[in-house]
Image (tube, rainbow, N blue to C red):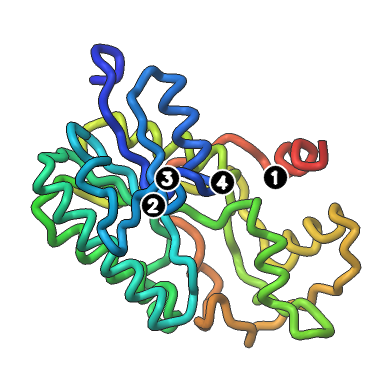
Amino acid sequence: MTSERSPMKIVVIGGSGLIGSKLVTKLREQGQEVVAASPNTGVNTVTGEGLAEALKGASVVVDVSNSPSWEDTAVLNFFETSTRNLLAYEAAAGVGHHVALSVVGTDRLAESGYFRAKIAQEKLIKGSSIPYSIVQATQFFEFLKGLADISFDGKQVRLPHVLFQPMAADDVANAVGRIAVGPPLNDTVEIGGPEQFRIDDLVRRRLAALKDSREVIPDQKALYSGAKISERTLVPGNNVRLGEMRFETWLSRSAA
């Protein structure tokens, strides 16, 4: 791998977020030259501010950014504008690899405004001249409480009793980092956790660990990010690359 010979300049878009900050640390530990790019470091992918400067001499751009608003129109506008700008500035800077973090099951969730935006993002990347790797991850353990919050109707947390295979943010950052320093796949790869659960069961366990007394109810009509989902909508296929951290391990670490 090139990383062992000479450091590459890697720009992490969304470099101050949950995955981005972990990724920046991991790549720097490997000796890469890493730019953590986000609006608070003066790089705005929607307006284009600071992009040309950040991308100068970069070999790889990793986009782990997320929309500040999840309202349907706003999120579509964010991912389309941001991705178009990134790809245009990358072409001008001679960047050789665009890596984007997406979500397992995105193409099965077109009823959701958020996932329509992710579908649009993936389509732009595939249609561009820049060699790419799209990494579709399952849900993160870190977001289980957030999932409870958005599924709370004021009385109960209502979640579909379907399969999912969530993973630790650390494992997401590791997988994205490995792909970033490797050759472009020009394809989509799925990553997920080592165990499968039922969404409502795992959220119940997370809330119990947080001493959060809200009741979690399995409800097959409950929507996921605005979309109806079935048994296997959120689980990866057979070629998934698995993270190492099990839920119990993550839970005891997050309690510490």
Measure the C-alpha gap from mark 4 to mark 2. Answer: 16 Å
* Amino acid type at mark 2: Leu
x, y percent for residue 43: 34, 50
Instruction: State the CA–CA distance, disc 3 to disc 1.
Output: 33 Å
Does residue 217 appear left or right of residue 73 in this picture?
right
User: Is disc 2 placed on a helix, strand or loop?
Assistant: strand
Of label 1 and label 2, which has the lower sequence position? 2
- Residue 41 tag number: 3
Q: Is residue 217 left or right of residue 133?
A: right
Question: Relative to residue 31, is residue 239 depicted above or below?
Answer: below
Contact flag, marks 1 and 4 (Cβ < 8 Å): yes
Q: Which residue is mark 2?
A: 101
Q: Residue at x 44, y 65 (%)?
A: 67
User: Would you say the residues marked 3 and 1 are in contact, meaning their CB atoms lie under 8 Å apart?
Assistant: no
Q: Secondary structure at mark 4?
A: loop
- The C terminus appears in which quarter of the rendering? top right
- Vertical placement of residue 96 versus 240, above or below: above
Q: Earlier in the sequence, mark 3 or mark 4?
A: 3
How many residues crowd mark 2 within 10 Å: few (<14), some (14–19), many (20+)? many
Q: Which mark is residue 193?
A: 4
Q: Could you say where residue 126 lies in the image, as x and y percent from the top left?
A: 18, 59
Q: Residue at x 48, y 80 (%)?
A: 71
Q: Is residue 239 visible?
A: no
Residue type, mark 3 in image: Thr
Q: Quadrant of residue 155?
A: bottom right
**Mark 1 or mark 3, which is nearer the start of the sequence?**
3
Instruction: Please tell me whether mark 4 or mark 2 is closer to you in this view.
Output: 2
Q: Secondary structure at mark 1?
A: helix
Drawn side of residue 74 relative to residue 127, left or right? right
Percent x, y of residue 198: 67, 64
Q: Earlier in the sequence, mark 4 or mark 2?
A: 2
Disc 1 target residue: 247
